[in-house]
Image (tube, rainbow, N blue to C red):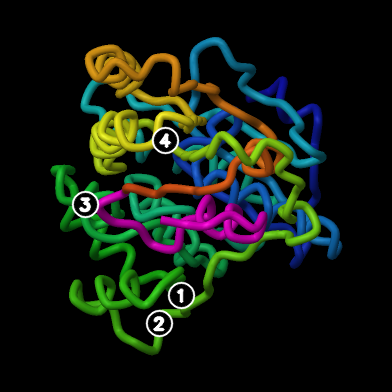
Amino acid sequence: MADAAKHSPHTMHKHNLLFIIGCYHPDIGGTERACCTLAAELRALGYGITIVTAYREGLPPYEVIQGIPVYRYIKGWHLFEATYMLSVLSFLIARRRSFSGVLCFGLYLFTAPAVLFCRCTGRRIFFRLSSARETGDFYRLAKLKLRPFILWCAKKAHGAIAISREVKAELMQHGFPQNKIHTISNGIDTDIFSPGQHNDRAVTTVCYAGRLTQGKGLETLIRAAGRLKAAAPAFKLLIAGDGELLPMLHAEVAAAGIGQQVTFAGRLDDVAPFYRQSHIFVLPSRSEGMPMSLLEAMSCGLAAV
């Protein structure tokens, strides 16, 4: 912490904000991209932005990404939930002179200590939900032992940001007052995500971009591609992203006999060219909030399924 403090990214100012997020670069999920985009836009407007996220083996504990200081500080040891919260609280106390407001990307363990700290020190705090139903914040929260405490703290925040009407409905179902809920949809830069030229019309290219995790419906996408092979042999399926389902998806592709049609592109920092080489975007998720990947693909002119 002392080494990171030498960088001294900000002094206390009313326009210095702290973003707290569970995962960050090099992860490229929708929440991470939304955090990165908002940080860049606010920085351009003169705000000082600092991001704190979870520690990750093999990555530096502090670095500057696109001009934004990023601390990989949050850790959970034994008694994971309690020590995770304590690590967040220790960061907030140590960096208390560096920010005047906090935005939590997600309703998770870090939300509770952030709300308590901000309420005790007179800072403003909001949290932003990323999704709904079985891929959503409340679904993940239900698996935590400290769920009642986290919910109690979250209701003390100055406001909750819902990215869709479905997310807002979930907040209200869990007892959050309507006057504390702010519906702010995801946005994208249409100068970056714009249509490209498709030269090869003989081969229809279908794509997916996102996490390779449970709830995204990727096994359904692979099965559908297997059926397409007989009906429409001239097609390609491009899958961008990383996650725990990657080995299983490779096995399913092999079992379906579509190894020649399916390409796993891995984690991509720049997804706009990926969309531009495709014709159709497929989002097989069982639930979402307002997915960045869908908005990006539509902005690039793709048909969306």
- Of callouts 4 and 1, the N-terminal one: 1
Q: Label 4, label 1: how many angstroms apart (C-alpha)? A: 31 Å
Left or right relative to 231: residue 173: left
- Check disc 4 and give the amino acid type: Arg
| 133 vs 22: above or below | below
Q: Label 4, label 2: how many angstroms apart (C-alpha)? A: 30 Å
- Is 250 a magenta residue? no
Left or right relative to 143: residue 51: right
**Which residue is tagged 1?**
158
Highlighted magenta segment, given as a residue range: 285-305
Measuring from the top left, give residue 1's x and y in whole percent: 63, 25
- Disc 3 crowd rating (10 Å Cα; few below 14, some 14-19, many 20+) is some
- Check disc 3 and give the amino acid type: Glu
Could you say whether the residue bearing mark 4 is in a helix, strand or loop? loop
Q: Are marks 2 and 1 in contact (CB under 8 Å)?
A: yes
Q: Are marks 4 and 2 in contact (CB under 8 Å)?
A: no
Q: Label 3, label 4: how many angstroms apart (C-alpha)? A: 14 Å
Q: Are marks 3 and 4 in contact (CB under 8 Å)?
A: no
**Which residue is tagged 4?**
211
- Of callouts 1 and 3, the N-terminal one: 3
Measuring from the top left, give residue 100's x and y in whole percent: 66, 62
- Of callouts 4 and 2, the N-terminal one: 2
Check residue 180 in the rendering and tell me which mark sits there, or answer none: 2
* Image point (39%, 89%), residue name: 179
Left or right relative to 49: residue 109: left
* Image point (51%, 48%), residue name: 280
Q: Label 2, label 1: how many angstroms apart (C-alpha)? A: 7 Å
**Which residue is tagged 3?**
134
Q: Label 2, label 3: how many angstroms apart (C-alpha)? A: 24 Å
Q: Label 1, label 3: how many angstroms apart (C-alpha)? A: 26 Å
